[in-house]
Amino acid sequence: MFKEELSLVPHLPGCYLMKNKNDNVIYVGKSKNLKNRLTSYFRGTHTGKTAMLVSEIDHFEYIITSSELEALLLEINLIKKYNPRYNILLRDDKSYPYIELTNDKVPRLVVVRNPNIKKNKTHKLFGPYPNVTAARETVDILNRLYPLRKCKTYSKKECLYYHIGQCLGYCTHEVDKEIKDNMRSEIISFLNGNHEIVTKKLTSEMEKYSDKMEYEKAMEYKSMLDYINVVLEKQKVELDDNIDRDVVGYYTNNNYLSVQILFIRGGKLLDRKRDLFPMVDTEEEELTSYISKFYDKHKIKPKEVLIPDILDENILTQAFDIKFFKPQKGTKKNILDLASQNAKIYYNEQMSLIEKDEEKTLNAVKELGSILNISNLSRIELFDNSNLFGSFNVSGMVVFIDGKPYKNEYRKFKITNDKNDDYGTMREVIYRRYFRVLKDKLTKPDLIIVDGGIGQVKVAREVIDSLNMNIPVVGLKKNDKHNTSELVGNDPIEIINIDKKSNLFLLLTKMQDEVHNYTISYHKQIRSKGALSSILDNIDGIGEKRKKELLKKYKSINKMKEATKEELEEILPSNVASNFYEFLKEYN
């Protein structure tokens, strides 16, 4: 297989692109020896994801680079460009939160994701934190102890925070620079790992309220004190240099890679990032690729990263301007071993669950492909429409790859034709999506699923045919209880019977629920942004005069919802009041 093509590949570093029969890039990899690496795919037997990848390869391309470092950087850019199917599991979709202490005249503490380093280079950033809850909890404690500015913009008078002693009233009062500098210094010290000052302040506040017998208030400060003592103080590690560092441990078995990254900040173990996924490449390449994507995405980088022997610290150091170090003994080696031990434990915890779930999901996808006569069914795009009596007409699209949701590819559509026309909405959203796919040469799905029956399927197929795109379209109908009921497809269109207890039916239900919830969420978001008067503009029979009367009497949509139909009839004709009353019942 590919014997002639492989004979031309040189023994040089570079990147390779695996493509399927539709000329789509399905995997991007790198190697310091392209010939050896590419040959390894087509010799011997493979298992798991590697076997699936090889079965789909129709041809490959490669790009020679002058060094392994160039190959690493090129691989990162090619994966960003093509979003290959078999690289998806290696993508880090999560943006970790950071705490930012602004360098404004009056500083604020805010939680940010993906901070703009260039824009905010004078601001202090701390993190990453394991989750937004931990970051917000920390900001809340500091805001309670230090009277920082809480509001984004200045007001003309003191706000509630000033009156409860949590702000110095910067909008109306001049505050001494020394006070602000001291606050800033103590906060930076705390976020760098020195908790002593904050602990003393919390203890003092707790004792003050306890002496005044304000026990509820004292308990609030005790809870904050416990958070620092239990959550933060217990995370001390045996390194006293206060250097921000990450520690990368890993474990492999059964062609799966478990990765554990420990975050050490200010001499304390903040938390960890962990992942488990099937390997397509070698251990070294998979782990290098994973680390590369992680540090390419996260802009606030540590001073040092401890890594295992299997990796090349020189290439990683050059690529990301971080000191990558392979400890051989001592405390750092012990911490690295701890990270690998955690990776092994995570593997043992998750493996049985993952194998069962993956087998069920992949078999369900294969069954759907068999039923619809689609070979190598992988990417499925699903659509749902939502409106409220023709108002705020929107659509949502979700993407499932190999039966799993790929949220980076979800899309929202605000429909231009704002009336209750489901077919018109379907026609518009399908055209907009797949005209864009053609225009921007995006990845085509193997299957389109629309929410609805024969009519919706016909409309979607007409649009796809008009664009000369050969993509199968099926529909998922719901019953009266809004539960997944039937699969509509084939040619001529018919109801396709699927066992309601099968894994396939469960997967289809999961997909339909996902697209429905995503679309409804967007619909509520759009509605919440619409002004009350805009909502009234969408109700037949309510003109400018009646709108003013309603706004004058009720002021808000919630007050209108509390009104009876008879009360609405005091302003509106009976039929208009009845329709508006039904509208308000559905509006939430």
Image (cartoon, grey):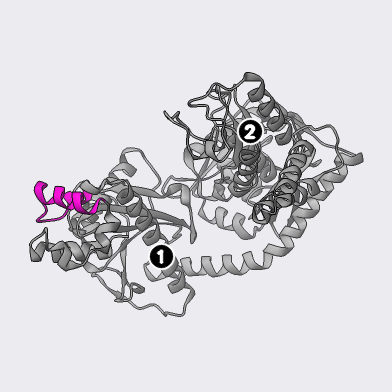
Main SS, magenta region, reads: helix
**Residue type (three-letter) at the residue carrying disc 1:** Asp
Q: Which residues are magenta?
A: 534-555
- Vertical order, 111 against 48 (above or below): above
Mark number, residue 62: none
Q: Residue at x 52, y 27 (%)?
A: 170
Quarter-wise, where is residue 370 in the image? bottom left
Q: Residue at x 20, y 60 (%)?
A: 389
Tell me where residue 335 appears, x and y as whole percent. 83, 45
> Is 93 inside the magenta-drawn segment?
no
Task: Decide if residue 532 is in sight here.
Answer: yes
At mark 1, the secondary structure is helix
Tell me where residue 321 appears, x and y as whole percent. 69, 26
Q: Which residue matches tag 1? A: 513
Of the image marks 2 and 1, the number of the one nearer the N terminus: 2
Q: As rendered, which of 218 and 424 lies closer to the eye? A: 218
Q: Which residue matches tag 2? A: 72
On the picture, is 408 further left or further right than 325? left
- Vertical order, 440 against 64 (above or below): below
On the picture, is 232 further left or further right than 171? right
**Residue type (three-letter) at the residue carrying disc 2:** Leu
Quarter-wise, where is residue 435 in the image? top left
**Circle 2 or circle 1, nearest the eye:** 1
Crowd rating for badge 2 (residues with CA inside 10 Å; few <14, some 14–19, many 20+): many
Which residue is situated farthest in the front direction here? 212
At mark 2, the secondary structure is helix
